[in-house]
């Protein structure tokens, strides 16, 4: 069975999405011109990508959502070849449009730390890394791929236990479009003591969003008063974001295209869904894999090995 997330291998070790980018484009991203006030949101897929993007943009706008411009937000930098108009309207401009975005730019990527633009290391740009419980990532990723295939590609992929088992094996084996979750997380975690890196737990965003908003705003040098913080929290709610995504999508449709439901890009992010999807054998395998991969890492992930 072919992987559900086909990938290219870049520089002999890094996985990048085969459907939506090229090796040349990733190289262009590495060598892009970086501004001093660029903010990078780095995140493994299905860990709160659009949520954190929106939060940072809202903080910059003092919580005034009406000031946000869809043409300059929801940038996923490495998506070079987005073939679907629906996807284009959802993720926003790609790298070739980033240069036209007003400062400060919020640039989001799922790529590993080693592939961030070289100038970002020289200029010590702010990097916000969002970390989510790995097994919840696996389940959310699987559900997204099935829904995404039907909505964007027009090719339904029905859920079967065999399909989930194969997807689980692919992620455990690093055979996915962004490679191994552990490698991605640990690569960024190595910079935990750097002043320009901030780690945020997805679970903290779920439990106390206001606290996270204040933490992020302080980190990027945008102190907000209580009223502005409240505006950000309200505008970053799932209900408001879903409505915003759908409105932006419908306004950016190409002629003759029908609107589709984009709720798959803004999910509620329920916690501990893996408990209803993993078999006891998969749970044991993942526990063992987790211990092995995290043996030399002191990162606390909100994941408790059973």
Image (tube, rainbow, N blue to C red):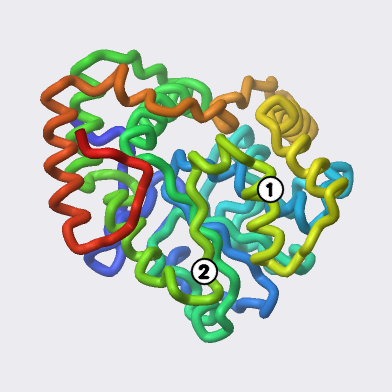
Q: Say whether residue 77 is visible.
A: no
Residue shown at the point (41%, 72%) measured from the top left: 191
Residue shown at the point (82%, 42%) measured from the top left: 231
Does 102 sit left or right of 119 as displayed? right
Image quarter in which the C terminus is found:
top left
Q: Residues within 10 Å of mark 1 (few under 14, many from 20)?
A: many
Residue 97 spot, x, y in % from top left:
68, 60
Q: Secondary structure at mark 2?
A: strand
Q: Which residue is mark 2?
A: 197
Residue shown at the point (61%, 60%) measured from the top left: 107
Label 1 and label 2: CA atoms lie apart by 17 Å
Comparing 189 with 90, the one in front is 189
Q: In the figure, residue 235 lies in which quadrant?
A: top right
Q: In the figure, residue 90 lies in which quadrant?
A: top right
Q: Is residue 167 above or below residue 156?
A: below
Q: Which residue is mark 1?
A: 55
Q: Given contact means CB atoms under 8 Å apart, are the residues at marks 1 and 2 in contact?
A: no
Comparing 64 with 171, the one in front is 64
Q: Residues within 10 Å of mark 2 (few under 14, many from 20)?
A: some
Residue shown at the point (50%, 80%) measured from the top left: 121
Does 91 sit left or right of 287 as displayed? right
Residue 158 spot, x, y in % from top left:
34, 14
Residue 243 spot, x, y in % from top left:
74, 26
């Amino acid at each position: 069975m072919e992987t559900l997330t086909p990938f290219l291998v870049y520089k002999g070790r890094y996985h990048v999405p085969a459907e939506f980018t090229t090796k040349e484009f990733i190289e262009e991203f590495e060598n892009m011109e970086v501004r001093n006030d660029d903010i990078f949101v780095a995140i493994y897929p299905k860990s709160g990508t659009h949520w954190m993007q929106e939060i940072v943009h809202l903080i910059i706008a003092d919580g005034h959502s009406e000031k946000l411009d869809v043409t300059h937000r929801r940038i996923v930098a490495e998506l070079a070849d987005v073939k679907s108009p629906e996807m284009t309207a959802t993720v926003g401009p790609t790298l070739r449009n980033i240069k036209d975005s007003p400062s400060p730019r919020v640039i989001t990527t799922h790529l590993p730390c080693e592939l961030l633009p070289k100038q970002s290391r020289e200029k010590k740009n702010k990097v916000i890394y969002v970390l989510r419980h790995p097994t919840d990532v696996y389940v959310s990723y699987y559900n997204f791929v099935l829904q995404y295939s039907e909505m964007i590609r027009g090719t339904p992929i029905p859920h079967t236990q065999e399909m989930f088992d194969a997807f689980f094996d692919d992620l455990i084996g690093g055979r996915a479009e962004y490679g191994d979750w552990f490698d991605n997380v640990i690569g960024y975690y190595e910079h935990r003591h750097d002043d320009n890196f901030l780690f945020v737990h997805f679970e903290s965003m779920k439990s106390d969003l206001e606290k996270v908003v204040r933490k992020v705003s302080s980190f990027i040098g945008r102190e907000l008063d209580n009223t502005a913080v409240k505006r950000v929290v309200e505008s970053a709610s799932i209900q408001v974001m879903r409505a915003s995504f759908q409105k932006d999508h419908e306004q950016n449709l190409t002629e003759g295209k029908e609107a589709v439901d984009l709720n798959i890009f803004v999910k509620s992010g329920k916690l501990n869904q893996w408990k209803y999807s993993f078999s006891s054998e998969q749970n044991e395998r993942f526990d063992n894999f987790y211990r092995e991969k995290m043996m030399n890492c002191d990162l606390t992930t909100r994941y408790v090995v059973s």
